[in-house]
Amino acid sequence: MKIIFAGSPAFAIPALNALYESGEDIVAVITQPDKPVGRKRILTPTPVKERARLLNIPVYDFQRLRDNVQTVKEIGAELMITCAYGQLLTQDILDCFEKGVWNLHASLLPELRGASPVQSAILGGKTHTGITVMKTELSLDTGDMLCVKRLEIGDSTYGELEERLSYLAAEAAVEALGYIESGNAQLLVQDEAAATYCKKINKEDGKINFANSAEDICRLIRAMNPNPVAYCMQNGNILNVLRADVCDCTETVCENYGTVICADKRGIKVACKDGAVRITELIPAGGKKMSAADYVNGRKIKAGDKLD
């Protein structure tokens, strides 16, 4: 069966690799156009484009997929698998594939339809998330489900969880194609009553509010690591926070949320709504990633200082 794989970021590479290594006939890869990256704005291909080239798979980087329906038809694939591709598909594109278009979505649908399912699972305090293989239709992430794989979130950061999910997506892609090729594809309709949605995460969503609970603050920090990164302000400068823990607060809780209770080799203990969080890793304004202990040793912060 001839397959097109559509994906763009590094998240999609394990699925592409798994399909290639399993012997599937990947006749083309579709990805986003090259984009300027870094301060020098160097035009850079997507990670999926680079990987496809190494695998000697033809690559198409359409500016607008919807304007290239005829080209997609001429490729002659029977099925397309999408994984974090980054463009909406039109009905004309869906109609190009006799055996359908199948998306690898990083949530347990119908929960967390939308643009930020991995981060939103952490923010929402979910204990589990996963990959759902669904048949793509025009509505947002509403298609019938073919395969679902679960994993425990634990205390993973966004980056750590996304990496684990990328390999789970690879397993799911191979398994789903096995069902389709064998004619044993049994689909489950999503429960609309249980559907939830998540929005795109922006830099301002990472602002820490120390009036929130310690658990909420730590979830926010994990969900924003490595990007866009949670942050607070110290003396008018941004202090990016990469890691923090809920900590026991034996001292009298300071009602002035954001006040530094103590700063030592264990980290920076900050008052919040129901106790305290201990910041253990950060990036100061204009600086590099460092332990909070090193930041304290540099006398950049002390007990009584205020973070907001």
Image: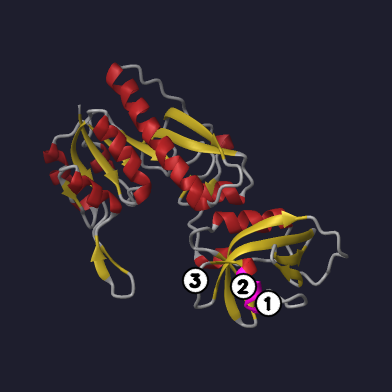
| 89 or 248: nearer the viewer | 248
At label 1, which amino acid type do we have?
Ile
| Label 2 – label 3 distance at C-alpha | 11 Å
| Magenta stretch bounds | 294-301
Q: Which quadrant would residue 20 be assigned to in this image? A: top left
User: Does 172 appear in magenta?
Assistant: no
- For the N terminus, give its image quadrant: top left
At label 3, which amino acid type do we have?
Lys
SS at mark 2 in the image: helix
Image side of residue 142 versus residue 92, left or right: right
The residue wearing badge 3 is 288
Percent of width and height locating residue 264:
72, 68
Asked whether the beta carbons under mark 1 and mark 2 sit within 8 Å of each other, the answer is: yes
The residue wearing badge 1 is 301
Residue at (58, 80) in percent of width and height: 237
Disc ID at residue 295: 2
